[in-house]
Image: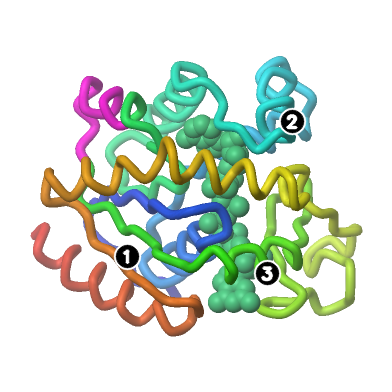
């Protein structure tokens, strides 16, 4: 049973494959704080073949970030629907204009958790990631394999690889991260919000994040 916590507004920052989605899942299980994952929102639109999905698809396939105003609008709409509850932002903001847009809208962040994982580890993880397209459930043939190979644990439906986990798209995503997202590290550090967690194994980093959130949430009192 997940422990309920007072309002908490967190953002996860980190390269593709650094484990943002995996950590967001653990945070929900342990603290009951649900996530708003910008990539998941876009993939859901692509799956449902909406106009938004149609616009986003070519950027995602190429491993490029979608335009700032486009994703900001989508995430802000989702946050408004959540009301005053806490949340974990997974994958947003990831450019300076996106961070400024949050500030302009007076959306308060309590802390930014930055996952620092080496590029070699990331490439290995992404080449063995499989997802259930309809729900977004994530598996990894080494780390958290499905109970039946190639099948979703809940529905039994076939798993697929993400459009942007091909090696050339991964190279492009890592470049976008270096050039457009890493400046946020300095930005959030200067605001006293940045907390970095380094490591190559999620299960070894998790206890540090768990301890941080436990003490941080209490201190919000
Ligand atoms: P996303 O969806 O935000 P990325 O590229 O930021 O995508 P990604 O790939 O979803 O991030 P992650 O969530 O950080 O990675 O990592 P994860 O899925 O939890 O873990 C990766 C794999 O490693 C999984 O298979 C997991 O099981 C496994 N794993 C975890 N821990 C371990 C471990 O300890 N050991 C091992 N062996 N495996 C492990 O964005 C996608 C696209 O959407 C657009 C862009 O086009 C973007 O490229 N987009 C935006 N564009 C502009 N602005 C934004 N804010 C945007 N947000 C999304
Ligand atoms: Mg993710």
Left or right: residue 148 versus residue 162 is right
Of the image marks 1 and 3, the number of the one nearer the N terminus: 1
Q: Nearer the viewer, residue 186 or 66?
A: 186
Mark number for residue 178? none
Of the image marks 2 and 1, the number of the one nearer the N terminus: 1
- Determine whether the residue tagged by mark 2 lies in a helix, strand or loop: helix
Q: Residues within 10 Å of mark 2 (few under 14, many from 20)?
A: some
Left or right: residue 81 versus residue 37 is left
Mark number for residue 124? 3
Mark 3 to mark 2 CA distance (whole Å): 26 Å
Q: Nearer the viewer, residue 171 or 35?
A: 171
- The residue drawn where x is 47% and y is 65% is 23
100 shown above or below 137? above
Mark 2 to mark 1 CA distance (whole Å): 33 Å
Q: Give the image location of residue 190, x and y in percent.
A: 12, 45
Q: Are marks 1 and 3 in contact (CB under 8 Å)?
A: no
What residue is shown with label 2? 46
- Determine whether the residue tagged by mark 3 lies in a helix, strand or loop: helix
Asked whether mark 3 lies closer than 8 Å to ligand 1, one says: yes
Q: Nearer the viewer, residue 184 or 55?
A: 184
Q: Nearer the viewer, mark 3 or mark 2?
A: 3
Residue 193 showing in the rendered view? yes
Provide the residue span drawn in magenta.
99-108
The magenta stretch spans residue 104: yes
Quarter of the rendering occupied by the N terminus: bottom left
Residue 40 showing in the rendered view? no
Asked whether mark 2 lies closer than 8 Å to ligand 1, one says: no
Quarter of the rendering occupied by the C terminus: bottom left
What residue is shown with label 1? 4
Q: Are marks 2 and 1 in contact (CB under 8 Å)?
A: no
């Amino acid at each position: 049973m997940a422990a309920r916590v007072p309002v908490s507004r967190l953002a996860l920052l980190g390269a593709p494959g650094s484990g943002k989605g995996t950590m967001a899942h653990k945070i929900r299980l342990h603290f009951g704080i649900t996530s708003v994952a910008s990539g998941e929102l876009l993939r859901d639109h692509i799956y449902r073949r909406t106009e938004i999905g149609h616009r986003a698809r070519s950027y995602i396939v190429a491993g490029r970030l979608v335009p700032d105003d486009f994703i900001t609008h989508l995430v802000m709409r989702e946050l408004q629907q959540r009301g005053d509850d806490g949340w974990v932002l997974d994958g947003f903001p990831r450019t300076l204009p996106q961070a400024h847009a949050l500030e302009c809208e007076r959306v308060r962040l309590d802390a930014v958790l930055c996952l620092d994982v080496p590029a070699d580890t990331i490439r290995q993880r992404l080449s063995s990631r499989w997802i259930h397209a309809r729900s977004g459930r994530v598996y990894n043939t080494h780390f958290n394999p499905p109970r039946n190979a190639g099948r979703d644990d809940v529905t039994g439906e076939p798993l697929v690889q993400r459009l942007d986990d091909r090696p050339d798209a991964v190279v492009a995503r890592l470049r976008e991260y270096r050039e457009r997202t890493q400046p946020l590290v300095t930005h959030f550090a200067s605001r006293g919000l940045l907390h970095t967690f380094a490591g190559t194994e999620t299960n070894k980093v998790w206890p540090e994040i768990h301890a941080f959130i436990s003490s941080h949430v209490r201190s919000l009192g």
